[in-house]
Image (cartoon, grey):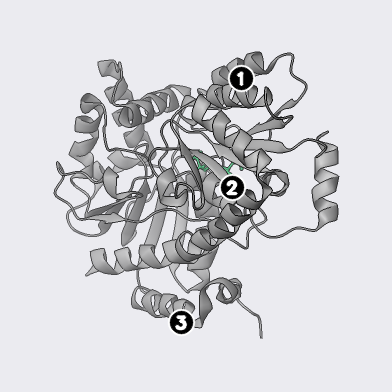
Amino acid sequence: MVVKMIEKYVEFIGEHELDAIFKIAEKIKDLSILHVNSTKAGGGVAEILNRMLPLMKELGLNVDWKVIKGDNEFFNVTKSFHNSLQNGTGNIPDEYFKIYDKWQEINLSEIPLDYDIMFIHDPQPAGLIKFKKGNSNKWIWRCHIDISNPYPPVWNFLRKYISKYDSMIISVPSFGRDDIEIPQFVIPPSIDPLSIKNRDMSETTILRILYKFGINLEKPLITQVSRFDYAKDPLGVIQAYKLAKRHVDIQLLYVGSPATDDPEGEKVYSEVVKASEGDKDIHLLMLPPYSDLEINVFQTASTVVMQKSIKEGFGLTVSEAMWKRKPVIGGNTGGIPLQVINGITGFLVNSPQGASHYIIYLIRNEEIRRRLGTNAREHIRRNFLITRELRDYLMTIVYVAN
Ligand code: UDP
């Protein structure tokens, strides 16, 4: 008998939970489901879909995934929408709204809109709903970003579309909107404990990859894994490291990769290069997408992991590190406090000075690192594994389909 991949999750969640997933899936096995987003690789949404789709298929669901098309101009527009929705400020020319609409129309010939359930991720493809035909199918908007304090002109534009959906999903309760009538579900994202990025590795693999990238562990390693995006505060990470370095001898690793729907990355990268100049204990890596084994190695080999975001929808990198029993110093924003419970599974900070304080504290306290790491792993096992998100998605589909 071939053992299904999904059966392997029993080790983490137990038979009852897995059984529940099979039973819910049974209720929707006659429906066709399409996920639509804006990039095949790079960033958290693609990360989850790459792992979620095969599991949904194993459950016997009729599910597909399509990526919308866009040129540089379109992704500049959507990135500025993204920033203004998360930051509450912006400077958006009228023509941006026209470019956004133009690309929704272009994508009409790329994306089939007749699946029973249209699962649309984030703002980039949200406008496709204007082509929905009557009440023939159900549309869910899955929002992965912080929309608690959006820039009104962009939100009001998007809201016209969102209010046509049958329901929406947010990651954190505080992202809920009272200016929109449709049902809103809170479903935090998740990580896959069986993916190459998250499963245990041999010591030899770890040492081989560290060697390949010229990293030795003579000094404690502080790591942040993130796209080169101002919201991830890479310059704040470097500042925190430099402040801490006056007291403890450490090295910093900042690992990023490009995402096709994030055109701002190059500019941020060059600023980070400049800020790191002259310090041989700062390792800056720009890796290709799908460097999952390398990311796993870097997180596993770290003494402390940072995710010093200023804005964060959820921050999968936090769960990834916590699953590897790492104490995480996280920005006190968005989805990070769901994961980092201050003083119990890590520390929350609001400034580079705060981050530097906890770097020093953690480097000097092995026992605290160990205790936080143990709690962190258990917190992720209970709350942020892919099987929980899968179950929540299935329940949402059951809800909208009835
Ligand atoms: N990631 C990666 N390589 C990189 C940077 C990030 O594989 O160089 C992955 C990271 O491990 C995580 C995802 O991309 O799985 C980022 O998700 P997150 O929710 O942290 O942030 P987002 O990029 O979606 O804002």
Report which residue position mark 1 lands on.
272
Q: Quadrant of residue 119?
A: bottom left
Q: Position of residue 229 (x, y in %)?
A: 51, 27
Q: In the image, which is nearer the foreground, mark 2 or mark 3?
A: 2
Front label number (2 vs 1): 2
Q: Quadrant of ligand 1?
A: top right
Q: Relative to 385, is 166 on the left or the right?
A: left
Name the residue tied to disc 2: 327
Residue 319 drawn at (x, y percent): 53, 51
Pointer 3: residues within 10 angstroms few (<14), some, or many (20+)? few
In terms of depth relative to the viewer, which is nearer, 348 or 96?
Answer: 348
- The amino acid on which the numbered mark 2 sits, given as a three-letter code, is Pro
- Above or below: residue 331 compared with residue 198: above
Which of pointers 2 and 1 lies earlier in the amino acid sequence? Answer: 1
Camera-side residue: 286 or 99?
286
Q: Does dot 1 land on a helix, a strand or a loop? A: helix
In the rendered structure, find residue 1 and report the number of the disc placed on it.
none
Name which residue type carries label 3. His
Give the SS element for disc 2. loop
Q: Eyeballing the image, is 4 above or below 212?
A: below
> Mark 2 and 1 residues: CB-CB less than 8 Å, in contact?
no
Three-letter code for the amino acid on which mark 1 is drawn:
Val
The label shown at residue 16 is 3
Residue 385 visible in rendering: no
> Which quadrant is the C terminus positioned in?
bottom left
| 255 in relation to 294, above or below | above
Residue 208 shows in the view = yes
Q: For the residue carrying disc 2, how many other residues have a C-alpha within 10 Å: few (<14), some (14-19), or many (20+)?
A: many
Q: Residue at x 57, y 53 (%)?
A: 372
Question: Relative to 336, is 129 on the left or the right?
Answer: left
Q: Quadrant of residue 41?
A: top right
